[in-house]
Amino acid sequence: MPLGTAIHNIEITPGKGGQLVRAAGTVAKVIAKEGQLVTLRLPSGEIRLISQKCLATIGQIGNGQNVG
């Protein structure tokens, strides 16, 4: 994925299923790639490293008006 891509439903461990950024209207951004790791900025502002082998869905989750 190119840098700056908006993603959601992100796996923490490859093959375990999406565990991060699953609430309505949320999105994480790909901010860097280095070796086999990708750096993400989560909606909370946390910066997290995950494996490039982890799957994610491109785009923002819909129904953002429900975010309070």
Image (cartoon, rainbow, N blue to C red):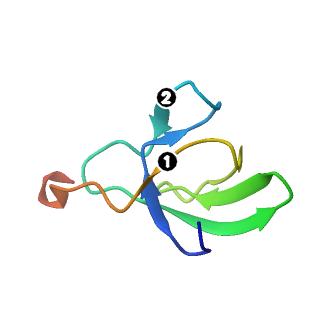
Label number found at residue 56: 1
> Badge 2: how crowded within 10 Å, few (<14), some, or many (20+)?
some
User: Could you tell whether 7 is left or right of 46 in the image?
Assistant: left
Residue at left 36%, top 62%? Answer: 59
Mark 2 lies on residue: 17
**Residue 4 drawn at (x, y percent):** 55, 75
Residue at left 27%, top 57%? Answer: 25
Residue 2, by quadrant, is bottom right
User: Could you tell whether 11 is left or right of 34 in the image?
Assistant: left
Residue 50 shows up from this direction: yes
**Residue 52 drawn at (x, y percent):** 70, 49
Residue 67, by quadrant, is bottom left
Relative vertical location of residue 53 with respect to residue 19 in this rendering, above or below: below
Residue at left 51%, top 70%? Answer: 5
Callout 2 amino acid: Gly
Dot 2 and dot 1 residues touching (CB under 8 Å): no
Relative vertical location of residue 51 with respect to residue 5 in this rendering, above or below: above
Label number found at residue 11: none
SS label for mark 1: loop
Relative vertical location of residue 63 with respect to residue 15 in this rendering, above or below: below
**Residue 27 drawn at (x, y percent):** 40, 59
> How far apart are the alpha carbons under marks 2 and 1?
9 Å
Residue at the outermost right position? 35
- Nearest the eye: 64 or 38: 38
Callout 1 amino acid: Ala
First-in-chain label (2 vs 1): 2
> Badge 1: how crowded within 10 Å, few (<14), some, or many (20+)?
some
Residue 68 shows up from this direction: no
Residue at left 49%, top 54%? Answer: 44
